Image (spheres, coloured by chain):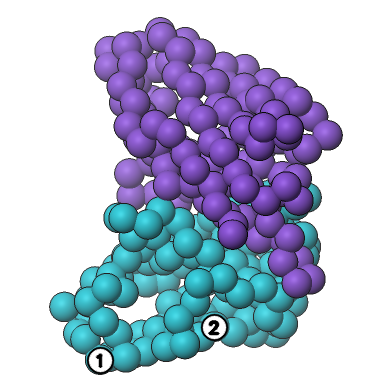
Chain colours: A purple, B cyan
Amino acid sequence: GENVEQHPSTLSVQEGDSAVIKCTYSDSASNYFPWYKQELGKGPQLIIDIRSNVGEKKDQRIAVTLNKTAKHFSLHITETQPEDSAVYFCAASVPSYNTDKLIFGTGTRLQVFP
Amino acid sequence: DSGVTQTPKHLITATGQRVTLRCSPRSGDLSVYWYQQSLDQGLQFLIQYYNGEERAKGNILERFSAQQFPDLHSELNLSSLELGDSALYFCASSVGLSGGDQETQYFGPGTRLLVL
């Protein structure tokens, strides 16, 4: 069935280090993969997304890679800062009857220590 | 600020009661999505509306229902509430129909529901 697995569930890094979060999806028809950042008390905010015709996308300190064959996609944050501390969710689109819907991973709590 | 508004921010009620959560999408967005976020289950897709019509259903209980009005705002109705319904409920909106494929979903700040 529809499933997105996300690892790790928690991640602690030192400021300036890199952080990597990995997701695996099950539906081979998935073709859109957004990443959301959720700060305490707020709604999820899109930080980057990638579509299936692209293998990698970068936006300043964040990048996402996609391996469609393996059904893996990953979020990379370089030069982490304390304000990067939040819960990060990956998602994959799944075709529905007459639209697509997003299936979310279970989230990764990232803590960046000064 | 995503441009999506949700009211109320917090809601405390008792088991067996009925509540209504309200969402106003971003200006120009025709699609509205509802999600439930509980501690142990992450973000669960409940239902999508597009321009007033239901388009997709997720893991939405029969006790829950939603609608989208002509002015595009949406309401999520939760009835016969149980303790396990306590969660954060998010609304998101996107420009068109695809939502999951081609269009970004913008999330509101959520409504925190506590059922006692």
Placement of B62 over or under A101, stated as above or below: below
Residue B66: give its label: 2
On the image, the x and y values in percent for residue A109 come to 35, 35
* Residue drawn at point x = 63 percent, y = 26 percent: A64
Image quadrant for the C terminus of chain A? top left
In this view of the protein, which residue sits in the foreground, B93 or A75? A75
On the image, the x and y values in percent for residue B31 come to 69, 67
In this view of the protein, which residue sits in the foreground, A12 or B52? A12
Q: CA separation, marks 2 and 1?
A: 18 Å
Is residue B94 visible in the rendered structure shown here?
A: no
* Residue drawn at point x = 16 percent, y = 78 percent: B116
* Relative horizontal placement of residue B74, taking residue B17 as reference (left or right): right
Image quadrant for the N terminus of chain A? bottom right
On the image, the x and y values in percent for residue A52 come to 78, 38
Is residue A20 visible in the rendered structure shown here?
A: yes
On the image, the x and y values in percent for residue B107 come to 54, 55
Name the amino acid type tagged 2. Ala
Residue B38: give its label: none
Category of crowding for the residue at label 1, using alpha-carbon neighbours closer than 10 angstroms: few (below 14), some (14–19), many (at least 20): few
Placement of A114 over or under B108, stated as above or below: above
Name the amino acid type tagged 1. Gly
* Relative horizontal placement of residue B92, taking residue A94 as reference (left or right): left
Q: Which residue is mark 1?
A: B16
* Residue drawn at point x = 57 percent, y = 78 percent: B74
* Residue drawn at point x = 71 percent, y = 75 percent: B55
